Image (cartoon, rainbow, N blue to C red):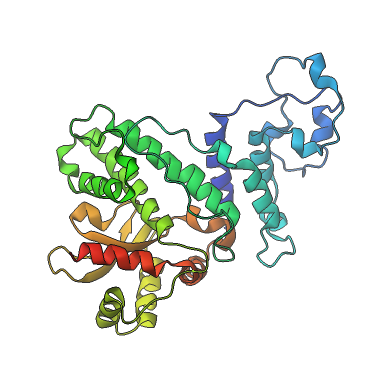
Amino acid sequence: READYRNFVRLTSSTFSKRTRPHPPTATQPRSHMLAFLPVNAPRALAAPHRTRPCSPVMAAPSPRPATAAMPRRALLQLALALPLAAITASGTPHGVSLQEKLLVTLFPPAFAAEAAAGPFALPPLKYAYNALEPAIDEATMKVHHDAHFAAYVSNLNKALAGVPGAPGPGVMEDTAAAQKALAKLLKGLGRFDENTRGAVQNNGGGVLNHWIFFDDMVPGGRPFKDDSDLGKAVVGGWGSLDEFKKTVKDLGLKRFGSGWVWLYVDSKTNKLAMRSYPNQDNPAMEGHEVVMGIDLWEHAYYLKYKNKRGDYIDAWWSVVNWDAASDRYAAAMR
């Protein structure tokens, strides 16, 4: 899937080009020296000189840093694009992605998270370290997923709700449970928005609620499934066993074309557990159901480590699932 990886880098590069300004090479380290190690098929954007003002004398001091350290972030992204995928993955580590991870961890530090627009919602902090879910989910993926993608959904949702009558007011984030309920209520009433606003609230509001639940429902080492819990009894009663339940999740996940989610939820009509896959950032809350747990099937959730092997990602995800959080959400839905 080299083409998919290259498309990812192109999209990411265009995003960062809007936020970062390239820095010129130092006077003692000409650009030709910086690019001497690039493959012959490097994109022209790397070889083209930056359109910047001449270096000031202050920048002329020699630096012991490697050539790549002086390169702007956009150039690093383009470097990743220029490198053959085999060179990026053949790193000799157990997961085969060390060079790729190093590039992306450098490119996506928390400081470069999406700037949140003012509004009722804010990016919930991650409750564990970026690398705490390894080996199931790698550090680079967690940084990109939480600090870039999740943050962008929060910011865009706030922009979409600006000036909308009846939208949640500032301060709703002070209570996490209340904020999630307010967002779920908002998504249940998409019909009251005009056509332009409706799409933005559906896509970004769904993205916020989905990721909020997704990150909350994971924990380092996972939390065990309990057969004697209310949720455990409902799962076994509906699918026969935990193994059959997991097979159903994987089957739905592999059949979901493109991006989407697999959701476990309490059906508002039957008051029983149900499961299905949803496209894009849609979720059961938009249909009036109560969400219990879900797995993200967008490629940004797994592609850096698992590439096109979505099934391997789904299998590994179970090792970090927080069944306690899912049980609490199920209990709240059944009240």
Residue placed most toward the observer, 183 or 54: 183
Q: Which residue is situated farthest in the front direction here?
A: 174
Figure quadrant of the C terminus: bottom left
The residue at the point 29 percent across, 49 percent down is 180
**Is residue 6 among the parts visible in the rendering?**
yes
| Residue 4 can be seen, yes or no | no
Q: Based on the displayed image, in which of its 4 quarters is residue 333 positioned?
A: bottom left
Residue 3 pos. (x, y %):
57, 52
Q: Position of residue 140 (x, y in %)?
A: 59, 52
78 vs 126: above or below: above
Residue 289 place in picture, x, y as percent: 20, 59
Give 177 or 208, whichever is nearer the viewer. 177
Residue drawn 16% across the image and 42% down it:
191
The residue at the far bottom in this view is 240
Instruction: Write the residue at 69% across / 18% down.
Output: 52
Q: Quadrant of the N terminus?
A: bottom right
Q: For residue 154, what is the image quadrant?
A: top left
> Residue drawn 48% across and 36% down?
114
Residue 267 position, x and y percent, is 19, 65
The image quadrant that residue 303 belongs to is: bottom right
Residue 216, above or below 24? below
Q: In this view, does 24 lie above or below 102?
A: above
Left-right relation of 240 to 320:
left
